[in-house]
Image: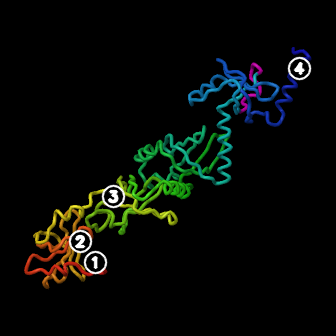
């Protein structure tokens, strides 16, 4: 039986344990008194020092965290008294408690959070939220194509491992150790933030790699890693392009040059063709006046017909050089070079028949 002194001491400890800030589950700050083979002793400013079990320290060591005497640490109260009368605390669970509090605050505020995907299961993604593993249901994953067959879902989810995305907290249940996130709810905000970061680091003339995300009649959209830029159809190739799909496909990785940045409008102009040699740089050596060539009519206008001479070079047969002959798009023609102006990207042509009139090989500037 305990004597009166022991009973008084135990009553004092019990009273201390009932004080605010010293109940099981609380997170406190203390100072390391000793680190030994059996664990770590922490001064918490209470009547008893806290003991961190060796197993708890090993978890931290696996993450590269070590402690030394005099260091300030944050711990969670796990057991107010074990079978040996020790006050058991945990540095590992303290970190988790802080993460749970953070998750609850984000749920209330709607704040977006960015983090890494560490794995997946049949239902969705596993994301590392501090020291907590959070879950993202498949219905809240924007990177997962809708209607993807069950057999292919695992492949799509596995491809996202190691990537970072923006998420919003949609459920927090500490008792069930359940933290649920949504990528879909954070998509627009995350993209806006990524675009702002990217715009700050872009400069005209830079070369970047990107993925083709969309094809339209007027050009192609390319994801540069947080923001889409546009390659106008005229900047896709040195050769004339009828539609971007004739050259590009969605999902294709390409290298582009930054042409123009409109930071106010958050628009980025790109060029694909400028990553290729300019065929006009060698036009002066390839073409000379009087040279006879063959080509294909690419388009007919009210002032003449354009002819594809190969490698992205087009020449113009002015209406005065057609000698009343009608030509149609796609027709093969024999032509004679009248003049070459590489600096203006112009070659004047005439049908290879009769006399030519060099002065009228191109229309006035405003008509071209």
In primary-sequence order, the first of circles 3 and 4 is 4
In 3D space, how far apart are the residues under numbered discs 1 and 2 (Cα atoms)?
10 Å
Badge 3 crowding class, 10 Å Cα cut-off, few under 14, some 14 to 19, many 20 or more, is: some
Residue at x-position 8% and y-position 78%: 353
Mark 4 or mark 1: name the one nearer the start of the chain.
4
Name which residue lies at 67% across and 54% down.
Answer: 109
Question: Is label 3 in contact with label 4 (beta carbons under 8 Å)?
Answer: no
Mark 2 or mark 4: which comes first in sequence? 4
Whether residue 207 is visible: yes
The stretch drawn in magenta includes residue 258: no
Q: Quadrant of residue 60?
A: top right
Query: Mark 2 to mark 3: distance in Å?
Result: 31 Å
Q: Which mark is residue 7?
A: 4
Residue 79 coordinates in the image, percent (x, y): 74, 28
Span colored in magenta: 76-85
Element under disc 3: loop
Q: CA distance from mark 4 to mark 1?
A: 104 Å
Q: Which residue is mark 2?
A: 346
Q: Disc 1 or 2, which lies upstream in sequence?
A: 2
Task: Kindly check if marks 1 and 2 are in contact, taking CB atoms under 8 A apart as contact.
Answer: yes
Q: Mark 2 vs mark 4: give the one in front.
A: 2
Residue 261: quarter of image: bottom left
Helix, strand or loop for disc 4: helix
Q: Where is mark 3, residue-wise?
A: 249
In the displayed structure, does residue 284 sit left or right of residue 236? left
The label nearer to you, 3 versus 4, is: 3
Q: Which residue is mark 1?
A: 368
């Amino acid at each position: 039986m305990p004597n009166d002194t022991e009973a008084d001491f135990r009553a004092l400890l019990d009273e201390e344990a009932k004080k605010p800030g010293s109940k099981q589950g609380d997170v406190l700050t203390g100072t390391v008194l000793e680190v030994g083979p059996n664990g770590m002793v922490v001064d918490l400013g209470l009547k008893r020092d806290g003991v961190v079990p060796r197993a708890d320290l090993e978890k931290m060591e696996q993450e590269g965290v070590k402690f030394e005497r005099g260091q300030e640490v944050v711990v969670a109260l796990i057991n107010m008294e074990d079978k040996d009368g020790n006050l058991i605390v945990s540095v590992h669970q303290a970190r988790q408690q802080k993460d749970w509090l953070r998750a609850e605050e984000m749920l209330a505020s709607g704040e977006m959070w960015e983090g890494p995907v560490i794995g997946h299961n049949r239902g969705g993604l596993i994301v590392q939220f501090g020291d907590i593993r959070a879950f993202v249901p498949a219905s809240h994953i924007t990177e997962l194509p809708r209607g993807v067959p069950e057999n292919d879902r695992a492949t799509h989810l596995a491809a996202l491992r190691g990537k970072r995305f923006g998420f919003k907290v949609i459920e927090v249940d500490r008792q069930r150790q359940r933290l649920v996130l949504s990528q879909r709810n954070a998509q627009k905000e995350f993209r806006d933030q990524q675009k702002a970061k990217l715009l700050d680091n872009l400069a005209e003339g830079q070369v970047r790699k990107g993925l083709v995300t969309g094809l339209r009649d007027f050009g192609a959209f390319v994801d540069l890693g947080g923001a889409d830029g546009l390659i106008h159809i005229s900047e896709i190739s040195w050769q004339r392009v009828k539609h971007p799909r004739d050259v590009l496909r969605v999902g294709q990785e390409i290298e582009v040059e930054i042409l123009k940045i409109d930071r106010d409008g958050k628009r980025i102009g790109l060029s694909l063709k400028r990553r290729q040699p300019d065929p006009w740089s060698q036009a002066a050596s390839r073409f000379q006046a009087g040279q006879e060539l063959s080509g294909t009519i690419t388009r007919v206008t009210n002032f003449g017909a354009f002819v594809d001479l190969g490698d992205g070079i087009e020449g113009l047969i002015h209406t005065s050089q057609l000698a009343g002959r009608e030509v149609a798009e796609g027709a093969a023609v024999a032509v004679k070079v009248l003049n070459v102006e590489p600096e203006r990207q112009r070659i004047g042509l005439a049908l290879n028949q009769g006399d030519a009139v060099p002065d009228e090989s191109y229309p006035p500037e405003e008509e071209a």
